Amino acid sequence: MNLRQPVRAGSFYESIPSSCRNHAVKLIESASVPDDTPPAFGGIVPHAGWAYSGRLAALTLKAVLRDPQVDTLVLLGADHCGTVRRGEVFDTGVWRSPLGDVPVNETLARAIIRADGCLRVNPKAHTYEHSLEVQVPIIQVLNPSIQIVPIGIPPINQAVQVGEVIGRVLKERFPHARVVGSSDLTHHGGHFPAPGGRGLQGVEWTEKNDQRILSLMENMQAAEIIEEAAEHGNACGAGAIAATVAAAKVMGSAQGLVLSYTNSYRIIHEQSPE
C-alpha cells in the first residue's frame, strides 16, 4: 500500500493533532459561504502556510463540499519539486495527516488513468510536493469520510487535455466527485523579485497582475492560462488551474466565481482590496 507521509506538518500547519484540528476548525468557522453561491463543480485553493492561505482555502473547500453527496475530491497540485511531467496520479493507498489517513479512491483513480495516456501512475511525484498536503486536514474536518485522488499537473498546454479527461470521467461515471486545484498567484517581494516595487506600490502591482489570471478563471478560458502565467508570472500552479477550469467546464460550469481574494501583505496588515 502506498502511504504518503506529511512533510510540511510543523511548519506550514501544526503537527500536533489537537492543535491541527483546532486551527482547521477555526479556519472553517471563519469562512462564510454566501447563501446564493451556486453549486460548485470545482474550485481553486492557495497553498502557502495556513497563516496566509488557510482561511481562503477553507472557504473554497467549504463551498465545494456543501453538497453532502460529494464523496471524493480529485486534487490537482502544482509542481515545486520538478517531479511532474504529465498528469501524475497517486493511485492507491492513503495520505496521512496529523488527523489520520485519507483513503485514495482507487476505482476513480484507475478510471482516470485508463481514460487517456496524458495521465499515469506516479505516487513518487507527490513525496515532497506540499500544494495538496496542506489542504488535507481542512478537508478531513469538513468531511471525515471523504476520499481523494491526488494528481500533479505540470504547467504545460497539455494540462487542459488532462483536465478535460478528468472532467469527462467525473461527469459520465462519478457524479459525486468534484475537482479542486491548488495554486498561489503572483510571488512578489520578500525573497522573491519585486518588479512592481516594494511596499503598497508592489502590492497594487501584484493585485493587477493577479487580476489578469483571475479573469481567465472566471471566464473559463482554460486554454489561455498556461501562456498567461508563463508571461506574467501570476501562478505557480498554472497547470493545476488550467486543468481544474477545463474539468469544471466539461462537468457543466459556465462561469467561475471569485469567492474571495487576498495576499500575504493584506493579511499581515489586516487590509482587504475588496
Image (spheres, rainbow, N blue to C red):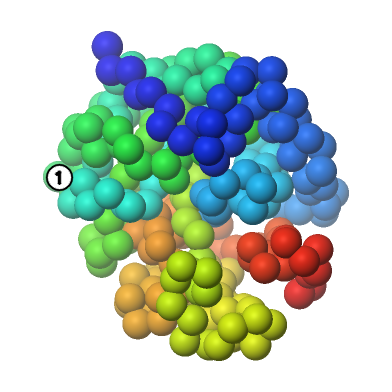
Provide residue 165's location: percent of width, then percent of height.
30, 48
Q: Is residue 175 visible?
A: no
Q: Quadrant of residue 250?
A: bottom left
The residue wearing badge 1 is 117
**148 up-or-down from 57: above or below:** above
Q: Is residue 120 visible?
A: yes
Provide residue 253's location: percent of width, then percent of height.
55, 57
Residue plotted at (46% across, 67% down): 191
Q: Residue furthest front?
A: 191
Residue plotted at (55% across, 20% down): 98
Residue plotted at (78% across, 35% down): 26
**28 up-or-down from 264: above or below:** above
Provide residue 127's location: percent of width, then percent of height.
30, 33
Q: Quadrant of residue 171?
A: top left
Residue plotted at (69% across, 32% down): 24
- Image quarter where the N terminus lies is top left
- Image quarter where the C terminus lies is bottom right
Question: Which SS class for mark 1?
Answer: loop
